[in-house]
Each structure stands twice: as C-alpha cells, then as structure tokens.
Amino acid sequence: MFSKKKLTLCVLTLGIALSACQDHQKSTDSKDHQEVKVDNALDISLDSTQMMAHLKAFEQIATQHQGNRAVGSSGGIASGDYILAYAKQLGYATQVQSFKNHQQLTGRNIIVTIPGTLKEPQLLIGAHYDSVKMGPGINDNASGVALLLELMRSLASSKQPLQHTIYLAFWDSEEEGIAGSRDYVAKLSPEQLQQIKAYINVDMVGTKDPEILIADGDRSSIDEMEKMLRERGMTENDFKPIIEGLRSIPVHAKDAALENSLQQFFKDKNLKIKEDVSILTASDTAAFLGKVPVTGLVLFNEKLQGDELEFAPCYHKACDTLELIDPESMKLAGEALMHLLRSLDAQ
C-alpha cells in the first residue's frame, strides 16, 4: 500500500475518509445488489498452504538481500525473477515491461497471460510485488502476489477453460509513486482499455483479525461522510475541500456492480464490511480509475502507533514478516477473488 498516513493528515485529508468509514461500518445486506447468478462455476480452489510457501520464499529473498524487496534493489529483482520462474514452470507466457520511476530507478512489471476461449474482453488482476526499503513487505504485498501465484497454479490445473483471457499483473514500484501500474496504463490505447472488462487489485490480504475494506464503487460513503461531518459541527468551509477532493476521484459506470458483487459475497458469509473511497487512490487501482471498472481486495487492522495510523500490524516496518500472516485471511481473500472471477467470467 503506497501512502502511510500520519495522524495529523488523518484529520485534514484522506485519513478522515478512513475514520468516517469506521463510523459508517454496516452489514452488507443494507444495500441492494446486482449480483449475476452463476450457473457454471469454475472448478477451482485456492490452497492457502501453497500461498504460505510462496510467502516463505519471499521472506527468504528479503533476508538474503538487505532485508527488503524494494524496487530496483537486488531483493526486488530476485522477487521478479521468482515470479517469472514460477510462471515458466507452469507453462505460461510472460511479458516484462521495464520503466523508470520518479527516482529514476528501473522497475519491471510482469504480465502473465492465461488464455481464455474468447479473445476479448479480458480480465486484469494485479498485485504489487515491491516492498518498502524498511522491511520485507510480506503482508504488503507479498501476500497479494502469493494469492495470484496460487491462482495461476490452480488455473493451470483446471479442466474447465475460462471464457475470458486473464492477465495477471505483478506491479513494481507501487511503494514509490504507484509507478508501475501508471506506466502500464499510460502505454495502453483507448481501444486496449476498452477491452479490459475489469481490474481487480489485491493488496495486504494476509492481515490477522482483519477489517474487510472494499472500494466504494458507487461513492455512497462520501454522502454519509458529509452528513457525519455536518452533524459533528464542522463548518462547510472546513469539510468542503475534503468532500470535493473525494468527489473528484474518477468513476466508471460499472464500478458499483463490482462493489455489489463483493458485498454479496461477504453478506453470504455473514461478515461485515466497510466501504472506503480513499483506498482507490492509495494503490494500483489509482492508475485505472475512470478508465475501466475497478475494485480491490484489502484486509486492514488499523491501529494508532504514536502519531501514526498503521493500516495493519508492522505496516511498512522490518517486522512485516511471515509470522504476522494469517492463512485464514489468505483463504478468505482467495475465496472472494474466485467469487469475482466466476461472476465476471460467466457474464
């Protein structure tokens, strides 16, 4: 996850969106949904044991390379090589797209193609594989990468072909300016963007005791936030810049359908969710906003540490290690991803 929010910023800018979302926590059955009924669910299951094995490998990579897997570092390069080797082992075609970020560090996006029976439209699922320089980044975001690698393995062994071609995107330099996914989108033509049926972002899905945060596709949380700020006595001059900033986040007409699909999944499991519009700008979804339908899987466990609000324990620290990962959270995120995939592939 790209930006670390200080407590003072939480009061003044996007952090207030997060705190508002905490007050806005609700059961997923509070909103009508437009879930597509799926009659031909794919015979695919994701194994959290396999995911944990990948996480162990990424932790070993960090240990062998100055304790991190940051963009342009030896650990970052080794992480990319691990992804490429695994895709090759499964027989998938890959593309490596190099770019320079704002620090002039060279990053590598890795795109894995999983062919479907239809040429277009395609599904794009992404996770950033770089860490911050301060730690190994096992939850943020080797966890998302491990989920995608396990999806890759499961699809390779599936006897039932997908309708839509899937591109698995392993982004570099998310922690430095969300540079990898921005570079990728900047090089797509309008016609290529139109061929993307949806972009699903997977980030920080190994958090223990998580709060389930979903992207607010219909932006309804902004209205709730404005109402709450008025009720708390904040003047319009104070909250108007915040609300206007959030309303300016680009929207795609089909964002809400993806949100509704995730809502229904968690409703069926009797789990509560929180909607948040600000997470759309804090990770690789930002590059796609308004251009293609987007959603994301994020599992948080927010805590105040001094004057800092951590998204999850040991966020952006050296202690973001395998020890903190919950296999049950990985399993839940995998089930949610498969729910989205089955729904989209059946449409």
Image: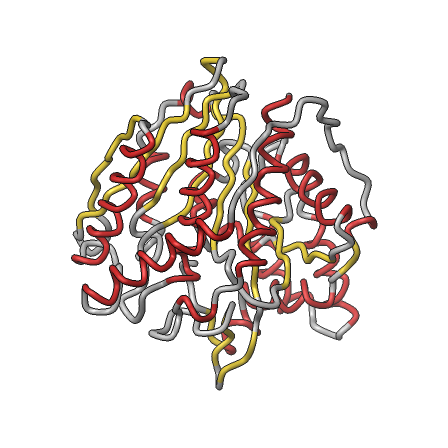
Please give left or right for residue 197 compared with residue 149 in the image. Answer: right
Q: Position of residue 91 (x, y in %)?
A: 31, 27
Q: Position of residue 198 (x, y in %)?
A: 53, 31
- Image vertical order of residue 17 relative to residue 191, above or below: below
Q: Write the residue at 47% across / 55% down.
A: 282
Residue 19 lies in quadrant: bottom right
Furthest-top residue in this view = 118
Please give left or right for residue 230 compared with residue 327 in the image. Answer: right
Please give left or right for residue 333 compared with residue 142 in the image. Answer: right
Count of numbered circles on the image: 0
Q: Position of residue 326 (x, y in %)?
A: 53, 63
Colour style of the rendered protein structure:
secondary structure
The N terminus is located in which quarter? bottom left
Residue 245 lies in quadrant: bottom right
State the residue in front, 201 or 17. 201
- Image vertical order of residue 283 relative to residue 98, above or below: below
Q: Position of residue 69 (x, y in %)?
A: 26, 59
Q: Write the residue at 74% across / 62% down.
A: 24
The C terminus is located in which quarter? top right
State the residue in front, 58 or 218. 58
